[in-house]
Image (cartoon, rainbow, N blue to C red):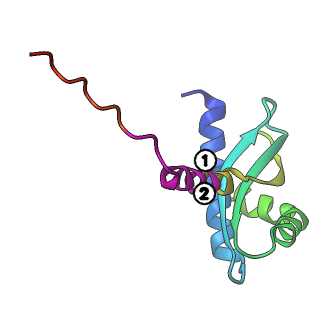
Amino acid sequence: MRRLDRVNELLRREISAVIQRDYAWHGALVTVSDVDVTQDLKEAKVWMSILGGNVAAVLDKLNREHGSIQARIMKRVILKSTPVLRFCHDTSAVRGVDLVNLLDAVEKLPKAPDEEPEAEAL
């Protein structure tokens, strides 16, 4: 596994722990789906899956608090430079639910009748 992949996964776990432990989301399910750190470790996009609640308000709160979140994470994760966190909305979960619903709808559509096997000649 590449070093950058290990850093991404480590940051994802630590950011997730801080967000779940130190913040209240009032009915929204907020999870860290992925972290993408630049090669120089200066910036990190944190992809958030937000179900229920106000997506814009959650992202706004996270981006306002990014310095505090970074400080908490860097007490547990030692890197040569602390990446600046930028929180983004990951819509893949919503797209996945939409796709499953679409497949269910297609399954309910009328189907062409099966072809009848040809009668055997006597």
Locate residue 65 relative to residue 110 in the image: left or right: right
Seen as rendered, the residue at the extreme bottom is: 26
Residue 98 belongs to magenta span: yes
Along the line of sight, the residue nearer the viewer: 95 or 68: 95
Q: Residue 9: percent from the left, percent from the top?
A: 60, 44
Tell me where the magenta segment starts and ends, as one range.
Answer: 97-113
Q: Amino acid at mark 1?
A: Leu
Q: Which element type, helix, strand or loop, lies under badge 2? A: helix
Residue occupying image coordinates x 45% and y 40%: 112
Residue 100 belongs to magenta span: yes
Along the line of sight, the residue nearer the viewer: 18 or 50: 50
* Mark sitting on residue 97: 2
Locate residue 59 relative to residue 101 in the image: left or right: right
Residue occupying image coordinates x 87% and y 67%: 56
Establish if 34 lies above or below 26: above
Quadrant of the rendered image containing residue 15: bottom right
Q: Earlier in the sequence, mark 2 or mark 1?
A: 1
* Mark sitting on residue 116: none
Q: CA distance from mark 2 to mark 1?
A: 27 Å
Residue placed under numbered mark 1 in the picture: 10
Locate residue 10 relative to residue 89 in the image: left or right: left
SS majority, magenta: helix
Q: Residue 61: percent from the left, percent from the top?
A: 86, 70
Seen as rendered, the residue at the extreme left is: 122
Establish if 68 lies above or below 22: above
Locate residue 77 relative to residue 112 in the image: left or right: right
Quadrant of the rendered image containing residue 117: top left
Do callouts 2 and 1 mark residues in contact (Cβ within 8 Å)? Answer: no
Q: Amino acid at mark 2?
A: Val
Q: Residue 21: percent from the left, percent from the top?
A: 63, 74
